[in-house]
Image (cartoon, grey):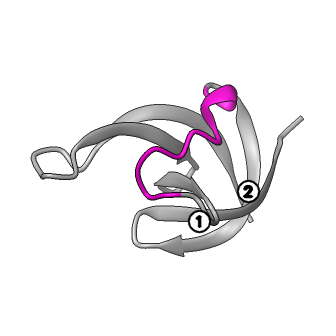
Amino acid sequence: MYQGLVTRQKVASGSKSERETIVLSTSDKDYILRMKGQPAFGDNTFEGVVNQNIVVEGTVHGTTLIVSSWKINE
C-alpha cells in the first residue's frame, strides 16, 4: 500500500519519453501513476485528484506504480 500527494510533474527529462504526467509523491519516492489495464501514455484516471492525498494498492515496475485500487485519503 502506498499513500501520498498526487501531483503533475515532468518526467524522463532529456529523453524521447520526456512528458508531463501524474505522479504520486510519497515520503520515500515519486511514482508515475497508471491504472491497471490503461495505456502507458495518456491514462487520465487521476486527473480529478491532482493536489489531493490518496491511498493506493498496486505493483511497482521501475518508476511506475500500476494501480489496482485507490481511494482519497481522508
Q: CA distance from mark 2 to mark 1?
A: 9 Å
Q: Give the residue at the far right of this rendering.
A: 74
Could you say which is closer to the camera, residue 16 or residue 63?
Answer: 16
Could you say which is closer to the camera, residue 16 or residue 8?
Answer: 16
From the viewer's perspective, tell me whether residue 72 is left or right of residue 44.
right
**Residue 71, position as x, y percentages in the image:** 83, 46
From the viewer's perspective, tell me whether residue 36 is left or right of residue 54.
left
Residue beneath the point at 68% across and 69% down? 58
- Total residue callouts: 2
Asked if residue 42 lies in the magenta stretch, the reply is yes
- Numbered label attached to residue 66: 1
Residue 64, placed above or below residue 5:
below
- Numbered label attached to residue 56: 2
The first of marks 2 and 1 along the sequence is 2
**Residue 14, position as x, y percentages in the image:** 10, 46
The answer to which quarter of the image holds residue 36 is: bottom right
Residue beneath the point at 89% across and 35% down? 74
Residue beneath the point at 74% across and 42% down? 54
Give the position of the N terminus as an image quadrant. Answer: bottom right
The residues colored magenta run 39-50
Tell me which secondary structure the magenta stretch mostly adopts. Answer: loop
Label 1 environment density (alpha carbons within 10 Å; few <14, some 14–19, many ≥20):
many
The answer to which quarter of the image holds residue 57 is: bottom right
Residue beneath the point at 28% across and 40% down? 19
**Residue 42, position as x, y percentages in the image:** 45, 44
| SS of the residue under disc 1 | strand
